[in-house]
Image (spheres, helix red, strand yellow):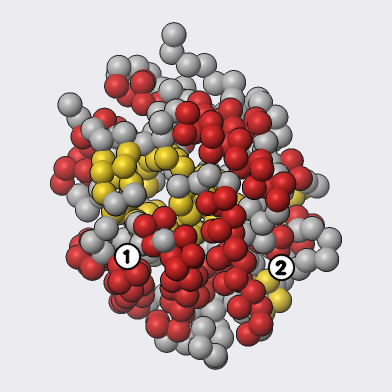
Amino acid sequence: MKKLFQPYNKGTLQLKNHVVMAPMTRSRAIDNIPNALMAAYYKQRSGAGLIVTEGTSPSPEGLGYPRIPGVFSDAQIEGWKLVTEAVHEGSAKIFVQLMHTGRVAHSSNLPEGYQVVGMSDSQAAGEIYTETGMFEYSAPKALDAEGIQRIINDHVRAAENAIAAGFDGVELHGAHGYLLEQSLNPHANTRTDNYGGSIENRSRLILEIAQKASQIIGADKVGVRLSPYLTTNGMLAYEESEVHDTYVYLSQELNRLGIAYLHISNNPGITQNTHNAIRKVFTNTIIYCNGFTPETAEAMLHDGPADLVAFGRSFLANPDFMRRIEKNEPLNEPDYSTLYTPGELGYTDYPELN
């Protein structure tokens, strides 16, 4: 039997197979509250051993996109319970991805009384979707020392809320240009205090959140997503050796904390040296994601640094993705025009095999 379909057992990751459903924003959380439609969507896809939810804000100021969920209110906790119960009925595990968008946001997407924030006041280049069209990213207000502590506390409280909602753990989104990756990048983080400057200082925000969340919910219920060398959402490249050193240091320190996994957003910019170095210093589970086919995923599990492989787009249009690849059946193609629209269309209505 192919390794993709074999159970995976390490720490709290007692999974029925080696397949992860990757986090994908779908913008179906009306008023930022998870709902029954979302529960149906995730249950359809519970053939995966592990599901990582769409990016979910730990606080109102992190809601940079329209209709993304949060996990900071009682109503959101109750809404997520519908999702976690549905996924567990399908014998899958589910982690919520905690995503504070930081400067990757527009002020019109935030609740009244909140503003876009960043590690510094540098504005990201590019545009973002709003309910009234595309606009340039808003200029962020630089977080002061009190704001940094608020960010940390919000993430820790969100981790507590996630466990109360029935999640098996949380994934800290330290990738794709959002706030936690903004802290790592010297172009987005020009601070001169303990959270800026050196690699150790720029890594401090992620490490403090991971440490404090681990103390509250257990390190074995914490994962971190990283995207070394990737330049998306306004991120600017910096010196290759410094990128390498940053992510090796961060992986080493996260390993010391004993967290459950690293989730690597794979991209052509990652050197083999960096792949090897991260694998050497991080001894728990490593998940790889981005652009895999069942065949390349199988090869990665056998010959590469991955313990698990995540699929994103394949799960968009194929709620029965696991059955399709097991039976070697063709996959549905996603309708990209409905990725972020409200309602069932292009969300829960994709055909399944008889």
- Tell me if mark 1 has few (under 14), some (14-19) or many (20+) residues whose alpha carbon lies within 10 angstroms of its own: many
In this view, the residue in front, 62 or 163, is 163
Q: Secondary structure at mark 2?
A: loop
**In the displayed image of the protein, which residue is found farthest to the right?**
112
The count of marks equals: 2
Q: Secondary structure at mark 1?
A: loop
Amino acid type, mark 2? Val
Occupied quadrant, residue 234: bottom right
Q: Residue at x 31, y 61 (%)?
A: 270
Assess whether mark 1 and mark 2 are in contact (beta carbons under 8 angstroms): no
Discs 2/1, front: 1
- Tell me if mark 2 has few (under 14), some (14-19) or many (20+) residues whose alpha carbon lies within 10 angstroms of its own: many
Q: Residue at x 23, y 61 (%)?
A: 283
In the figure, is residue 258 to the left or right of 55?
A: left
From this view, report whether residue 79 is shown above or below residue 228.
Answer: above
From this view, report whether residue 6 is shown above or below residue 183.
Answer: above
Q: Quadrant of the N terminus?
A: top left
Which residue was labeled with disc 1? 258
Q: Residue at x 54, y 34 (%)?
A: 85
In the figure, is residue 342 to the left or right of 168?
A: right
Q: Visible in this render: residue 115?
A: yes
In this view, the residue in front, 125 or 292, is 292
In this view, the residue in front, 299 or 82, is 82
Residue 49, horizontal then vertical, whole percent: 36, 36
Which residue was labeled with disc 2? 116
Residue 175, horizontal then vertical, whole percent: 47, 60
Residue 344, horizontal then vertical, whole percent: 66, 26
Q: Earlier in the sequence, mark 2 or mark 1?
A: 2
Q: Quadrant of the C terminus?
A: top left
Amino acid type, mark 1? Gly
